[in-house]
Amino acid sequence: MDLSSLKPAAGSTHREKRIGRGQGSGKGGTSTRGHKGAKSRSGYKSKIGFEGGQMPLQRRVPKFGFKNINRVEYKAINVGMLQALAERDNLTVIDRDVLVQAGLMSKNDLLKVLGDGALTAKLEVKANAFSAKAVAAIEAVGGTVVKL
């Protein structure tokens, strides 16, 4: 067996419908386009979203709100989670690589550390952003904060 011997499955292909080849073909006359109207003319091309003159959906639906294109999205991780991670893997330095390997964030995420949970381990934490409560919690136990 080689590529030249491959054929489509039986019944899966059909002959092309040949339109506009005279009355004997059964598809002559209006050539399956019906009578009159824009769709029967040559060169007809429908505009995207055109609904036959009815008010299109994208104009019927009300618009509201604002989407800031400069918004910075962070992956938020609490200091309680850092404590659990430090205990489990016996860590003193926590950065993005450690969290990516732990499956808590992807390598393209920006990291923000939040202050929820208890922290007892002395850690050096490297992240893109910190909340004030998180900085206070990390420095209270003698740890250091490094902003990337």
Image: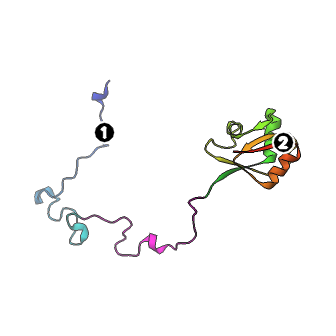
Q: Which residues are magenta?
A: 44-70
Front residue of this view, candidates 56 and 72: 72
Residue 40 as seen in the image, left or right of residue 108: left
Q: Quadrant of residue 84?
A: top right
Question: Dominant secondary structure of the magenta stretch?
Answer: loop
Name the spot of residue 130 as percent of width and height, x first: 75, 51
Amino acid type at image mark 1:
Ala
Label 2 residue SS: loop
Residue 13, quarter of the rendered image: top left
For the residues labelled 1 and 2, the Cα–Cα distance comes to 72 Å
Res 54 seen here: yes
The x, y position of residue 52, in whole percent, is 34, 72
Q: Which residue is mark 2?
A: 143
Q: Residue at x 85, y 39 (%)?
A: 122
Foreground: disc 1 or disc 2: 2
Q: Is residue 28 left or right of residue 145?
A: left
Residue at 14% from the left image edge and 64% from the top image edge: 29
From the viewer's side, name the closer residue of 33 and 52: 52
Question: In which quadrant is the N terminus drawn?
Answer: top left
Camera-side residue: 94 or 105?
94
Q: Which residue is mark 1?
A: 10
- Residue 55 in magenta? yes
Percent x, y for residue 115? 80, 52
